[in-house]
Amino acid sequence: MGSGLKTVKFWQIKPEIRILGVDDGPLENPEVPLVGAVFRGGRWLEGVLKTTITKDGTDVTDKLVEMVGQSRHMGQLRVLMVDGITFAGFNVLDVKEVFRRLKLPVIVVSRDLPNMADILKAVKHLPDWKKRWVKIKGAGRIHQVEIKRRGGPIYIQSVGLELEDAKRIVRLSSTRSLVPEPIRAAHMIATAIVKGESYGRV
């Protein structure tokens, strides 16, 4: 991996592997909900976690680690799956730090190919933008994953596990759309917390 981080080896990826999908709510207030949905594979919702993070802040890494680390589900989780690495605007998740502290591999999922030039242009308007940019670049190379039965590719980055294992877990959990079910559920729940109901592309 080139960073001194050891990967977690999956000798077998079971259909009921415990995955925590994480997404945030809409940007309507300075404090934004961050929701985790615990899934067995891509079929059974087993639990929901929630915390709050600051719009364009720097607290998402600590808040996510605290939320997951204190959860009763922690001992059964095998993978953390996040919807991109920027939350609540440009509150940037340090995926390598999350892996170091939780010892859980992280898969970053993007429905569309991230435009790094546009991201850099936007992040330069924020305090400590260089530190944020280091975290963004530190998430690693972007890889395309074909979800054939769903009609298109998605894009992933992975920390703490082999790329092929990450691809298998993404495909296994993408049961109802291109987006893996743990992230899709987290998105709907986070949106409903803010809006009163879920809506939009999931």
Image (tube, rainbow, N blue to C red):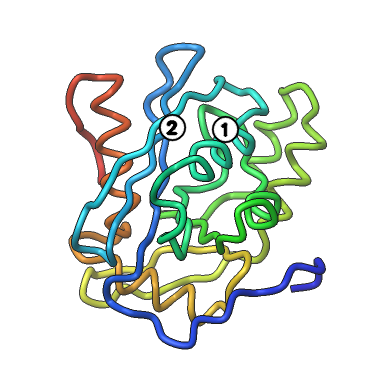
Position of residue 193 in the picture relative to residue 13 (left or right): left
Residue on which disc 1 sits: 63
Residue 150 % position (x, y) = 22, 69
In this view of the protein, which residue sits in the foreground, 146 or 25? 25
147 over 56 or under it: above or below: below
Q: Residue furthest top?
A: 29
Q: How packed is label 1: few (under 14 Cα within 10 Å), some, or many (20 or more)?
A: some
In this view of the protein, which residue sits in the foreground, 62 or 131? 62
| Helix, strand or loop at mark 1 | helix
Residue 21 % position (x, y) = 39, 51
Position of residue 69 in the picture relative to residue 39 (left or right): right
Q: Residue furthest bottom?
A: 11
Kind of residue indicated by mark 2: Leu
Is residue 109 shown to the viewer in this render? no
Cα separation, mark 1 vs mark 2, equals: 9 Å
Q: Which mark is residue 34?
A: 2
Quadrant location of the N terminus in the rendered image: bottom right
Position of residue 114 in the picture relative to residue 127 (left or right): left
In this view of the protein, which residue sits in the foreground, 156 or 79? 79
In this view of the protein, which residue sits in the foreground, 71 or 58? 71
Q: Earlier in the sequence, mark 1 or mark 2?
A: 2
Kind of residue indicated by mark 1: Lys
